[in-house]
Amino acid sequence: MTSRRGPGTIRSFPARPVLGFLTLAVLLSGGVAHAQSVDERFTVCLACHGADGQSRIPETPSLGGQPSFFVVAQLFLFREGRRDNPAMIAAAKGLTNDDLRAFAERVTKLPPPPPPEDAPDPARFARGRTLTLRHPCGVCHNPDFSGREQMPRLANQREEYLLKAMREYKSGARFGYGGAMSQELAGLTDQDLIDLAHFLAHQGAKP
């Protein structure tokens, strides 16, 4: 859960991420190392990403509703060390290509995250919507931002994770397919990214 104090400010409660990372550390040190099945390893993933596919840990994305192709591609990048996330690299270590597909199949069965309970900020929501119309967000990620093929679902993803991901794409810390994301975000200000994240996270939310 997150708490907002003003436009563009996202404050995370500290207890949940600490608990989540400690849980993952314990599971990775024992559970993954000795897990014999994909189901056991998938259970480890859900400890952080949410048993119902909806993350409760700040900056940890929800998995529910993500396209199978996207899940396979991201797990491959983690397995090969091409994405900078030590916990995920450790979790994906040793997975076969069949395992990647099996993980993706399980993810597709998780329900997509619902709209947040808090109402969106009208001005930020409107600015974010305008930005999606000026850029091909809805072309690649679908008009409803549900994602397709290798493009992830953006609708109702955790707001602070969306902002983190976009900042990383814009800075070059994270690479997208063919550099498309860094190119699309190149001319946007940080406030633009904040408004985009707010709009995408509040799809279908009650005003």
Image: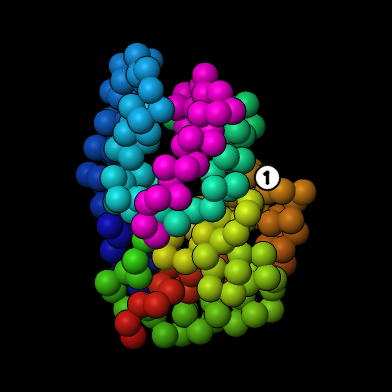
Q: Position of residue 117 (x, y in %)?
A: 27, 72
- Determine the secondary structure under disc 1: loop
Q: Position of residue 131 (x, y in %)?
A: 62, 77
| Residue shown at the point (22%, 44%) measured from the top left | 15
Q: Position of residue 51 (x, y in %)?
A: 28, 45
> Can the viewer see residue 202?
yes
Q: Quadrant of residue 121?
A: bottom left
- Give 206 or 190, whichever is nearer the viewer: 206
Majority SS type along the magenta span: helix
Q: Position of residue 69 (x, y in %)?
A: 60, 47
**Relative side of 100 to 35, left or right:** right
Q: Which residues are magenta?
A: 88-112
**Relative side of 13 to 72, left or right:** left
Q: Is 102 covered by the magenta stretch?
A: yes
> Can the viewer see residue 63?
no
| Residue shown at the point (46%, 37%) measured from the top left | 103
Q: Quadrant of residue 133?
A: bottom right
- Give 14 or 39, whichever is nearer the viewer: 39
What residue is pinned by disc 1? 175
- Amino acid carrying mark 1 in the image: Phe
- Give 126 or 96, whichever is nearer the viewer: 96
| Residue shown at the point (47%, 24%) measured from the top left | 90
**Height in image: 92 above or below 142?**
above
